[in-house]
Amino acid sequence: MLQEAATAVANNNQGLALIGAGIGAGLAVIGAGMGIGRIGGSAVEGMARQPEAAGKIQTAALILAAFIEGAALFGIVVAFSIQGKF
């Protein structure tokens, strides 16, 4: 009886860990999409207001987008490593 309860708790913890990993990966992707969308919109708006600064704005926007992608990739790797433990 006690052994069955311990097995049920272990299976429940495994399921919760997998759900948490899926939610974490999803949130990382959603956050990255929102961040890159905001950067793109702001960059286009800035270029429309000051066309002479378009080169600098574009360079800064690409660098910021790369940083956001790196953070999102880190979040996804952490979520998959949690999933791999179970």
Image (tube, rainbow, N blue to C red):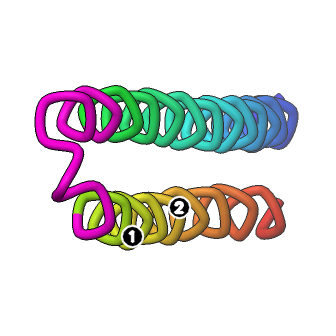
Residue at the (83%, 28%) spot, across then down? 1
Mark 2, other Cα within 10 Å: few <14 / some 14–19 / many ≥20:
some
Question: Is most of the magenta stretch helix, strand or loop?
Answer: helix
Q: Does residue 49 belong to the magenta stretch? A: yes
For residue 32, which numbered disc appears in the image? Answer: none
| Dot 2 and dot 1 residues touching (CB under 8 Å) | yes
Return the residue at label 1. 67
Residue drawn at point x = 24 percent, y = 58 percent: 57
Numbered mark located on residue 69 in the image: 2
- Please tell me whether mark 2 sits on a helix, a strand or a loop: helix
Q: Which residues are magenta?
A: 43-56
Along the line of sight, the residue nearer the viewer: 86 or 4: 86
**53 or 31, which is in the foreground?**
53
Q: Position of residue 31 (x, y in %)?
A: 43, 34
Front in this rendered view, residue 3 or 58: 58
The quarter of the picture where residue 20 lies is top right
Residue at the front extreme of this rendering: 52
Measured in 3D between alpha carbons, the distance from the residue under mark 2 to the one under mark 1, in whole angstroms, is 5 Å
- Amino acid residing under circle 1: Phe
Residue that appears at 25% across and 29% down: 48
Residue 9 at what x, y percent from top left? Answer: 69, 34
Question: Which SS class for mark 1?
Answer: helix
- Residue 10's spot in the image, x, y percent? 74, 44
